[in-house]
Image (cartoon, rainbow, N blue to C red):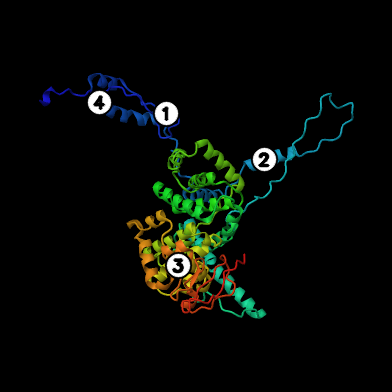
C-alpha cells in the first residue's frame, strides 16, 4: 500500500516571500558555481547546500556586503547604547579633533562684516541676505540633573531614585497632616481630635504594585469627592414636572435595572444611566410619553461611555418593544448631551465601595450586601441628594451591621472619610426601604439570585426580625397610614427606626444631607426626634 503512494517532489526553485520592508531579509544572492548547477540537475540538494556554504564566505570577504552590522531592534531602549557611547567618549578624550578648527574658521568667515561701498560700486541686483551664526542656546529641559552614584549601573541608580521618590510621596500626606496639626495647636485652634485617629495605612503594602497607584490614591479620591458634588441632581425636581411623579420614576428605574441585567453590563453603567436621567429631568420638563425614551437614551449613552463592547441601537429598540425608532433615540441622545453640556464625569458609588473594601479586607459577603444597599439609592428618591461617597459608606456600614462584622473602625473612617454619626441618617433611609413590602420586583429578583448570594431575601428577613415594630404591611400602604403597637396612625414618610439612639449617638438637630422626614423613637413610637434639613 505504501509503495503506491505518490512521492512529493522537492521543488528546485522556491519563490522568495521577502519584501522590501522586511528588515530580517537577506541583502544578497548566493553565487552558484558550475558544480552546484550540475548538482541541481542531478537532484542532489545536499551538494548544493554544501557548495553554497563554501562560496558565501568568499563572496562576503570580496564584496564586503555582509560586513555591515545588523540593526539592533531595541538598541535605543536598552543600556547597551549608553554604555557604548560612554566608552567611546572616554577613548576620545585624549584625541585632538581635527575638524573643529575648520568649523571655527567657517563660522568666523560667516560673521565677517564687509566694508561699506559707494552706490556706484553696488551691483544692480539686490544684495543677498547674510546668515548670522548665533551661539547655541542651552537645552530647554534638563534631563536627569540629579547626581548619580559613582558605582552601579543606570538601572540600579534609577531604582534608588524611584524608591526615594516613592517614600517621599508616601509620607507626604501624613507629614502634611502632622504639620497642619502642629500649626493648629500653636495657634490654639486644635480643640478636637481627628475622627480617624489611630487608622492603619494600608496603601503602603501596595507601594510596589504599579496598578494600585498607592502614591496617588489619596489625590484621586480627593478629586472624585469634588467631582461628585458637581454631578448631583436636584432632589426635588419632581415639583417641576407636570405629568410625572416619584412612583413613575421608580417604575422607570426598575425597568432599567431589568434591562441592565439582560445586557450584562457593568454596575457603573447602571449608576451613570440613572444619574443622567435625574440630571436631565432636573433641567427639562417632559411628557409621560417621553419618559421611557429618556431612560433608553440614558442607558445607551452610559453604555457607550463605560462599556468596552456597547450593545447596538437595535438591541435598545428591541427592549423598548418598538415604541421608538432609531432616529428618535439618536435625536434624543444629541439633545440630552447638549442639555448636560456633555459632562459625564460622574463619580460612581462603586469606586468608593472599592476604596472602603480595602479597609474591610475585601470581604465578599460585605461587598455583595453593600451593593444591594447602594442600588436602593437608584429606586428610592429620598437618596437622590446624598452624594455617592456617602451612599457607599452607609451601604458598607449597614452591610457590616447585618452581617455582624463589628464596629466602625478608625481605618474604615479614614478610607470612607465618614464617621459613624455622619452616615447613620443615610443608613436609616436604606433600612426604612427594607422594612416595606418590595415595590420594585425586578430589583428584588435580581438580588434574590444565587449570583448575589440572595442578599435581598436575607436583608429583608433580618430587618423584619430585628425591627418587628417598624414593619409596614400592604394594608398600611393601601390605607396610606402606618399603625404602631398602640394603634396610633402615622404618616408613611416617617422613619420608624432611630439608629442614633440604637448606637448611642446624639441625633443632630440639623443633618448634613437628606429630605425632610420625621423619625419615630424606638421606645415610645410617638415622639418625633428630629427632621432632615438639607444644608447644601
Which one is earlier in the sequence, the residue at label 3 or at label 2? 2
How busy is the neighbourhood of tag 4: few (under 14 within 10 Å), some, or many (20 plus)? Answer: some
Gap in Å between the C-alphas at discs 1 and 3? Answer: 71 Å
Which one is earlier in the sequence, the residue at label 2 or at label 4? 4
Q: Position of residue 454 (x, y in %)?
A: 34, 60
Choose mark 4 or mark 3, whichever is in front. 3
The residue wearing badge 3 is 431
> Is 436 situated above or below 260?
below
- Check disc 1 and report its element: helix, strand or loop: loop
Choose mark 4 or mark 1, whichever is in front. 1
The residue wearing badge 4 is 45
Residue 103 badge: 2
Q: Position of residue 271 (x, y in %)?
A: 49, 54
How busy is the neighbourhood of tag 1: few (under 14 within 10 Å), some, or many (20 plus)? Answer: few
- Residue toward you, 93 or 353: 353
Q: Position of residue 503 (x, y in %)?
A: 47, 77
Residue 207 visible in the current orientation: no
Choose mark 3 or mark 2, whichever is in front. 3
Which one is earlier in the sequence, the residue at label 4 or at label 3? 4
Gap in Å between the C-alphas at discs 3 and 2? Answer: 85 Å
Question: Circles 4 and 3: CB distance less than 8 Å?
Answer: no
Amino acid at each position: 500500500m505504501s509503495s503506491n503512494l505518490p512521492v512529493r517532489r522537492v521543488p528546485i526553485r522556491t519563490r522568495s516571500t521577502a519584501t522590501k520592508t522586511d528588515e530580517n531579509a537577506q541583502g544578497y544572492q548566493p553565487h552558484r558555481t558550475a558544480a552546484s548547477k550540475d548538482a541541481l540537475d542531478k537532484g542532489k540538494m545536499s551538494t548544493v547546500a554544501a557548495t553554497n556554504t563554501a562560496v558565501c564566505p568568499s563572496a562576503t570577504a570580496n564584496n564586503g556586503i555582509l560586513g555591515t552590522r545588523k540593526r539592533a531592534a531595541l538598541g535605543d531602549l536598552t543600556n547597551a547604547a549608553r554604555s557604548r557611547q560612554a566608552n567611546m567618549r572616554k577613548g576620545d578624550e585624549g584625541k585632538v579633533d581635527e575638524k573643529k578648527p575648520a568649523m571655527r574658521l567657517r563660522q568666523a568667515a560667516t560673521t565677517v562684516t564687509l566694508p561699506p561701498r559707494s552706490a556706484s560700486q553696488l551691483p544692480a541686483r539686490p544684495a543677498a541676505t547674510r546668515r548670522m551664526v548665533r551661539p547655541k542656546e542651552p537645552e530647554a529641559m534638563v534631563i536627569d540633573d540629579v547626581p548619580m552614584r559613582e558605582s552601579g549601573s543606570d538601572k540600579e541608580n534609577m531604582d534608588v531614585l524611584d524608591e526615594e521618590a516613592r517614600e517621599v510621596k508616601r509620607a507626604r500626606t501624613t507629614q502634611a497632616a502632622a504639620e497642619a496639626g502642629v500649626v493648629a495647636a500653636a495657634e490654639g485652634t486644635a480643640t478636637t481630635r481627628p475622627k480617624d485617629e489611630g487608622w492603619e495605612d494600608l496603601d503602603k503594602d501596595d507601594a510596589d504594585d504599579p496598578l494600585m497607584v498607592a502614591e496617588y490614591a489619596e489625590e484621586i479620591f480627593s478629586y472624585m469627592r469634588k467631582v461628585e458634588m458637581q454631578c448631583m441632581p436636584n432632589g426635588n425636581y419632581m415639583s417641576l414636572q407636570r405629568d410625572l411623579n416619584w412612583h413613575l420614576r421608580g417604575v422607570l428605574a426598575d425597568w432599567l435595572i431589568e434591562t441592565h441585567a439582560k445586557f450584562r453590563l457593568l454596575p457603573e453603567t447602571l449608576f451613570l444611566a440613572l444619574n443622567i436621567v435625574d440630571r436631565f429631568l432636573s433641567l427639562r420638563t417632559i411628557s409621560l410619553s417621553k419618559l421611557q425614551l429618556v431612560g433608553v437614551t440614558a442607558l445607551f449613552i452610559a453604555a457607550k461611555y463605560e462599556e468596552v463592547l456597547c450593545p447596538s441601537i437595535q438591541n435598545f429598540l428591541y427592549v423598548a418593544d418598538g415604541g421608538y425608532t432609531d432616529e428618535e433615540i439618536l435625536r434624543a441622545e444629541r439633545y440630552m448631551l447638549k442639555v448636560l453640556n456633555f459632562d459625564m464625569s460622574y463619580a460612581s458609588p462603586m469606586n468608593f465601595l472599592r476604596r472602603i473594601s480595602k479597609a474591610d479586607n475585601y470581604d465578599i459577603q460585605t461587598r455583595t450586601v453593600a451593593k444591594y444597599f447602594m442600588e436602593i439609592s437608584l429606586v428610592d428618591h429620598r437618596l437622590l441628594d446624598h452624594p455617592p461617597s456617602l451612599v457607599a459608606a452607609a451601604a458598607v456600614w449597614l452591610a457590616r451591621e447585618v452581617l455582624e462584622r463589628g464596629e466602625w473602625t478608625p481605618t474604615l473612617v479614614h478610607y470612607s472619610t465618614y464617621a459613624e454619626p455622619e452616615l447613620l441618617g443615610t443608613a436609616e433611609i436604606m433600612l426604612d426601604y427594607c422594612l416595606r413590602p418590595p415595590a420594585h420586583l425586578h430589583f428584588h429578583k435580581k438580588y434574590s439570585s444565587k449570583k448575589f448570594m440572595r442578599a435581598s431575601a436575607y436583608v429583608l428577613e433580618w430587618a423584619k426580625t430585628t425591627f418587628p415594630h417598624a414593619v409596614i404591611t400592604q394594608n398600611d400602604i393601601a390605607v396610606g397610614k402606618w399603625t404602631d403597637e398602640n394603634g396610633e396612625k402615622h404618616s408613611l414618610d416617617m422613619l420608624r427606626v432611630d439608629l442614633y439612639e440604637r448606637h448611642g449617638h446624639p441625633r443632630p438637630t440639623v443633618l448634613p444631607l437628606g429630605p425632610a422626614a420625621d423619625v419615630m423613637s424606638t421606645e415610645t413610637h410617638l415622639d418625633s426626634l428630629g427632621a432632615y434639613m438639607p444644608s447644601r
